[in-house]
Amino acid sequence: MRQRMRSGLLALLLGWVCSLGLRAEKVVTLPAPKSYINDYAGVLSDAAKAQTEAICREVHDKTKAQIFVVTIHTLGDESKEQFANDLFHKWKIGEKKTDRGLLLLFSIDDHKWRIEVGYGFEGILNDAKVGDIGREMVPALKQKDYDGAVELGVQRVAKVVADDAKITLDTLTPPDSSGDAGDTTSTPPPAVLPLADTPEPWWQRVDLPVWLIFFFLGLYVWYEVTRKGRRTSGGSGTSFSDSSSSSSDSGSSSDDFSGGDGGDSGGGGAGGDW
């Protein structure tokens, strides 16, 4: 009996350790981006991904600059600065000749954000400026309004890029009462309104390791019951296998998306917690 209990506890411990490792993303294992919005944590709605993707695409089409967004579950043992810088280099965000690229990173379980800026943007998007943009996203992040935070961040960055290039972005132009577009050079993007503080369902407040503990406990109880049943009835043993699968959502994709254009980052930017 003691041997079985030790085996059960060992299985629970291994399951908990494995769950932590599986949720931590690594830059080396992240695939090539399929779009400007890469939602590996699965926290963005389709509407938010489509809207921000359209803004990023128009920025690229009209200015040759690139804005990328990535959400992940957890950084693991890496710092947000190192993760963002390594991913920026891996995806080569921005054009090689101009280095006008920017990455917005959101680590959901860690409650950390980072805005990594390419060399070519440091004149108009310096550390202080992107720090202000990041802190402006924090109220929405605290409310778990990830759509609002990402939309706000992308809009603020896109507005700075558009103003510097002296162009108008149609995707930033809100319609007026007559249905015509307004002037984006004088109309700021809509402010992010805080969501009502509603309690989460109890099952969303339980961490994954706790669910794994319940799973292994249930598995152990089931095994003991069936084993005693076989001993009583004299039936033959039964074998089973457990398989798992994982999936990731990298945002809305497009067949003509080319990814990064060879840009580089010198480590400039800003980051924080929420």
Image (tube, helix red, strand yellow):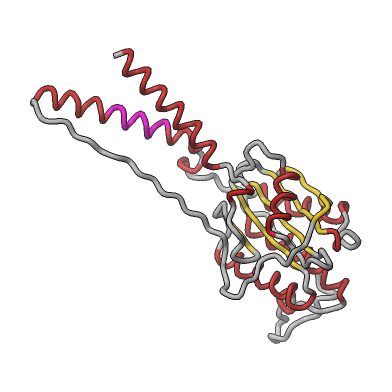
Q: Quadrant of the C terminus?
A: top right
In the image as oriented, which residue stretches furthest toward the top? 2
Figure check: 125 above or below 220: below
In the rendered image, residue 231, in percent from the top left (x then y), is placed at 13, 22
Q: Is residue 244 left or right of residue 186?
A: left
In the rendered image, residue 1, in percent from the top left (x then y), is placed at 29, 14
In the image as oriented, which residue stretches furthest toward the right? 123
Q: Which residue is at 81% across, 59% downward?
A: 118
In front here: 60 or 97?
97
Q: Is residue 79 left or right of residue 168?
A: left
In the rendered image, residue 73, in percent from the top left (x then y), is placed at 59, 46
In front here: 228 or 206?
228
Q: Is residue 265 left or right of residue 49?
A: right
The residues colored magenta run 213-221
Q: Assess whether residue 219 is covered by the magenta stretch.
A: yes
Where, by quadrant of the figure, is residue 181 drawn? bottom right
What is the chief secondary structure element of the magenta stretch?
Answer: helix
Q: Assess whether residue 130 is covered by the magenta stretch.
A: no
Q: Which residue is at 48% across, 38% downward?
A: 208
Q: Which residue is at 55% across, 65% downward?
A: 46
In front here: 4 or 93?
93
In the rendered image, residue 96, in percent from the top left (x then y), is placed at 79, 66
Q: How many marks?
A: 0
